[in-house]
Image (cartoon, grey):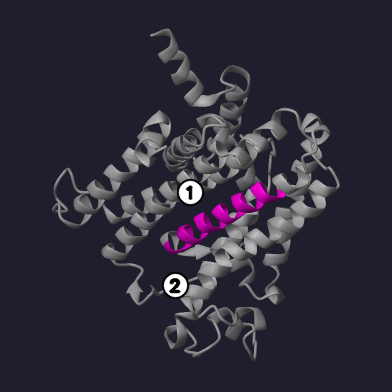
Amino acid sequence: MRPLQYIMQDRGGAWLLGLLAMAAVVVPIANLVVPSDSVFHVSTYTVTLLGKYLCFALLAIALDLVWGYCGILSLGHGAFFALGGYAMGMHLMRQIGERGVYGHPLLPDFMVFLDWEQLPWYWYGFDMFWFAMLMVVFVPGLLAFVFGWFAFRSRVSGVYLSIMTQALTYALMLAFFRNEFGFGGNNGLTDFKELLGANLQSDATRIVLFLSSAFALAAGYLLCRWIVRSKLGSVVTALRDAESRARFLGYRVEKFQVWIFTISAMLAGIAGALYVPQVGIINPGEFQPLNSIELVVWVAVGGRGTLYGAALGAVVVNYAKTILTGAFPEVWLFALGALFVVVTLALPHGIVGVWQRLRSKA
């Protein structure tokens, strides 16, 4: 099947890719070309906010791949997101050099403050961009592979697997909070200056980061769509619907589960790496289990098992979070909980399911 025909057969995906392409053209022009006093001008703050939403959308697609198509409800995908973010943050910290508060050419400011005498061995190599990008996918992927190998071979599934993934991200949060762990402790990594020689505070850099996020989301969606439409994806879906029958037919179920889980973790790591330079900080709070639970809500609201629905849910919920936390910050968690209850009871297929029912009746 030709690529264009393949995309057009997936209407939701075609809409997603079309909107991304339109945003990639309109947003840079509205930010860099349109005068700031014009009603059509898009501020740099808005560009950064949109870039964050796109990163969250990629993270939601990563979770939908394992939950919507493989039946693995992970409550620890926030850990893979945070690990990718820390890998990017380590590279950005190494780029500061003598421009830090203490002016040390090698050690980040927090290490100088804590009287560290030399750079830890696991920080070496992060001064090189290609190495940092390799670690962005390798570290989350390796963790997911090792965790999945033991969990799936032991036939841990259902709520027990969900609890284990939540325990994983909680354990990592506690570890990264410790100053002696070498990742900035409670404050994390911040005060970034530049990326590939470009000032992170400039409008042009923000646009490039936004475009990179849009491209990563489109590429991630196409990769996941290709996976679920392939023969391998058919087997994975069969595992979701009837795992015992698939085992009876001779499939090594754990191998398929580990493979999908690892790919999903790598995508989450990429999302985290794009998120960090746009927000300017990464700290252990990104590991907290609540973030992973929120991620499940995004996918459920949009519609799991669709990919584009997960992306839609991530954008809608986070836009609502931006509005509510600004106007009524104490109400947000109650609204999030109520939203999840409503979706679970009344809208089991999310926004996409509602739209599909309305189209079928029309």
Instruction: Residue 192: give its label.
Output: 2
Coordinates of residue 81 in the picture (x, y in percent)? 58, 55
Q: Residue at x 48, y 49 (%)?
A: 220
Q: Residues within 10 Å of mark 1 (few under 14, many from 20)?
A: many
Q: Is residue 40 left or right of residue 184?
A: left
Residue 311 in percent (x, y) is at: 47, 39
Residue depicted at x 74% and y 48%: 255
| Disc 2 versus disc 1: nearer the observer | 1
Q: Residue furthest front?
A: 1
Please say if the residues under marks 2 and 1 sit with CB atoms less than 8 Å apart: no
User: Which residue occupies 81% across, 31% down?
Assistant: 244
Q: What residue sits 71% from the left and 76% below the top?
A: 180
Q: Secondary structure at mark 1?
A: helix
* Magenta: main secondary structure: helix
Query: Measured from the top left, where is residue 258 in percent x and y?
Result: 71, 50
- Give the mark nearest the N terminus, 2 or 1: 2
Considering the image in quadrants, where does the N terminus appear? top left
Asked whether 357 or 315 is in front, the reply is 357
Q: Is residue 272 magenta?
A: yes
**Tag 2: residue type?**
Phe
From which residue to which does the magenta span run? 258-277
In front: 166, or 15? 15
Horizontal side of 156 relative to 306 (left or right) equals right
| Amino acid, disc 1 | Gly
Is residue 188 visible from the viewing direction of this image? no
Q: From the image, tell me which residue sits under label 1.
A: 220
